[in-house]
Image (spheres, rainbow, N blue to C red):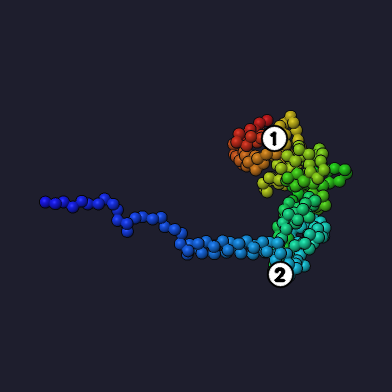
Amino acid sequence: MATRAVSRTRPAGRSRTRAKPTARGAVLRRRLIAAAVVLVVLYAGYMLWFRNLSWFAIDDVMVKGATTNERAIQSAVDGVAGDMTTLHIKDGELRDAVAHFPTVASVSATTSFPHGLEVTITERLPVAYVRAGGHSTAVSADGYLLTGASFDEKQLPRIEGAAPQGPRLDEDAAAQAAILGATPEPLRNRVTASNWDDDRGGVVLDLRNGPEVRFGDGSRARDKWDAAVAVLSSDERGSPSYLDVSVPDRPVSGG
């Protein structure tokens, strides 16, 4: 019986060929690239030209929050606002314009279309005062001399022996300001004196009807006050002559 040989050659119609990119895919890519270029051009046009158009020029400036040097601060803001538009607020220029006013802690701005600008000043608040050059000057918790700021000496503690260095307090006095700035509200009117004493570890505050409180340096001011309040409010504290919270996790009383 005759047998038929079976060819192992794969039929030509079933051979696999690698598919080439379709014309549709190439068109889609070109359209995406063109759209991206248009977006870049539009963004560049907005940043470099449109947002600086005189159509949006600022001609109505309101400054809020300033209670010291109000007119000077308003004038400084007006001086730089003329180079801005409601679509292009230059925050750096605003900060630089008021940076030389020690009472200004921060500045922010919002706009009202098409020509209005509202600038909000956050001020440094007096927490104590110093005597320098025969004058009393308020100081902030971060150690700035608040020249021109009004205050009542009867309502603020005095930092003794301060030696200002330019617009700021020296290191020892700045540590006292940091501690005084963190004083809890119920205790503010009980602070009668503040000074720096190396022999007693640094910042020392005297409290009316209470012990002297030793804080060490000006770091962790709130933690140290929390520790002091916890001891002062305890029924078991007795009547110590001093309370040391320089290490707030381990307060020590004695005397």
Marks 1 and 2, how far apart at CA: 54 Å
Q: Which residue is mark 1?
A: 216
- x then y, percent, for residue 172: 76, 37
Density class for disc 2 (Cα within 10 Å; few <14, some 14-19, many ≥20) is some
Quarter holding the C terminus? top right
**In this figure, what is the number of numbered marks?**
2
| Lateral position of residue 144 relative to residue 36, left or right | right
User: Toward which corner of the image does residue 166 lie, by quadrant?
Assistant: top right
Pick whichever, 188 or 136, lies toward us: 136
Q: Is residue 97 above or below residue 133?
A: below
Give the numbered dot on residue 85: none
Q: Is residue 238 above or below residue 94?
A: above
| Lateral position of residue 136 relative to residue 41, left or right | right
- x then y, percent, for residue 42: 64, 64
User: Toward which corner of the image does residue 73 lie, by quadrant?
Assistant: bottom right
Q: Which residue is mark 2?
A: 114
* Residue at point 47%, 64% (across, down): 24
Query: In the rendered structure, which disc, 1 or 2, sits on the residue that comes first in sequence?
Result: 2
User: Toward which corner of the image does residue 119 lie, by quadrant?
Assistant: bottom right
* Residue at point 83%, 52% (across, down): 148
* Residue at point 64%, 34% (across, down): 247
Q: Is residue 214 visible?
A: no
> SS at mark 2?
loop
Amino acid on which the number 2 mark rests in the picture: Pro
